[in-house]
Image (cartoon, rainbow, N blue to C red):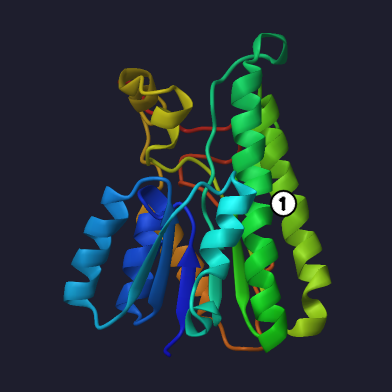
Amino acid sequence: MPEIALITGATAGIGEACARLFAAQNYHLILTGRRTERPERLSAELSSVCNIKIQILTLDVRNKAEVEEKLQGLSPEWKEVNVLINNAGLSQGLDPIHEGNTDDWDTMIDTNVKGLLYVTKVVSNWMVNRKHGHIVNLGSIAGKETYANGNVYCATKHAVDSLNKAMRIDLLPYGIKVTGIHPGAVETEFSEVRFKGDTERAQKVYEGFDPLVAEDIAETIWFCVSRPPHVNINDLVIMPKAQAGAYYWNKVES
């Protein structure tokens, strides 16, 4: 089979943008997500335009048994994954630590850290057996800096940053590349999810500047994946021009 990319959280945003870009590069795709309708529509669209095959796995990365069952249930040819993009992740709430919702904490930890680990555990074994592969982990500027009220979300993305480095070390003997991508402000469903459907509050996050969009991150991931075999991009922080860090902005007042 041609090369295969497995993308978690492929139902929207950066995951969907990656699916479109990798399909255009003739990768076969394994798309995972909790929702069924969106990936099915995306699959139908990409299959009609690109000469590729697509597998859809409806799963929640937080569910270890479900992840193992769905991934291990793939046929042998689909387990020859060349690129794993650990994109599934989210933030819930923006509260100081003493007012935080512990259910939100569990959701973020289970998705951003444990979910990434569950998927990586399965797929990295396939790559180790073949001594070939590239794992891309989606981090955040929140994994490089800590900002007010970001407490647990920042902690999960710091964990991703550390895991990225650990994977690079542990998988080095097997010729597997590992890359961490750490975006600043990207206008996707991220803020809407963080504020639990409050679209007005979510939109205010991106007022006064031009944020990154999902395609910017997908193109950055493709750049890292498409380097020559001897080149690995270990770590990459990408920002909108108007952002220099978690607290530094050049916003235009409306």
Residue 25 visible? The answer is: yes
- Viewer-side residue, 129 vs 100: 129
Residue 180 visible? The answer is: no
Percent from the top left, x then y, of residue 231?
Answer: 65, 82
Q: Is residue 115 above or below residue 204?
A: below
Image point 54% across, 21% down: which residue?
93
Within 10 Å of disc 1 (Cα), the crowding (few <14, some 14-19, many 20+) is many
Q: Residue furthest left?
A: 48
Residue under numbered circle 1: 161
Query: For residue 51, what is the image quadrant?
Result: bottom left
Percent from the top left, x then y, of residue 195?
Answer: 44, 22
The C terminus is located in which quarter?
top left
The N terminus is located in which quarter?
bottom left
Q: Amino acid at mark 1?
A: Asp
Q: Is residue 148 above or below residue 241?
A: above
Percent from the top left, x then y, of residue 78?
Answer: 48, 79
Image point 49% across, 73% down: which residue?
74
Percent from the top left, x then y, of residue 217?
Answer: 45, 57
Query: For residue 236, what is the image quadrant?
Result: bottom right
Q: Is residue 179 left or right of residue 159?
A: left
How many numbered badges does the structure rendering display?
Answer: 1
Image point 73% across, 43% down: which residue?
158
Considering the numbered disc 1 on the image, is that residue within a helix, a strand or a loop?
helix
Query: For residue 199, what is the image quadrant?
Result: top left
- Viewer-side residue, 231 vs 47: 47
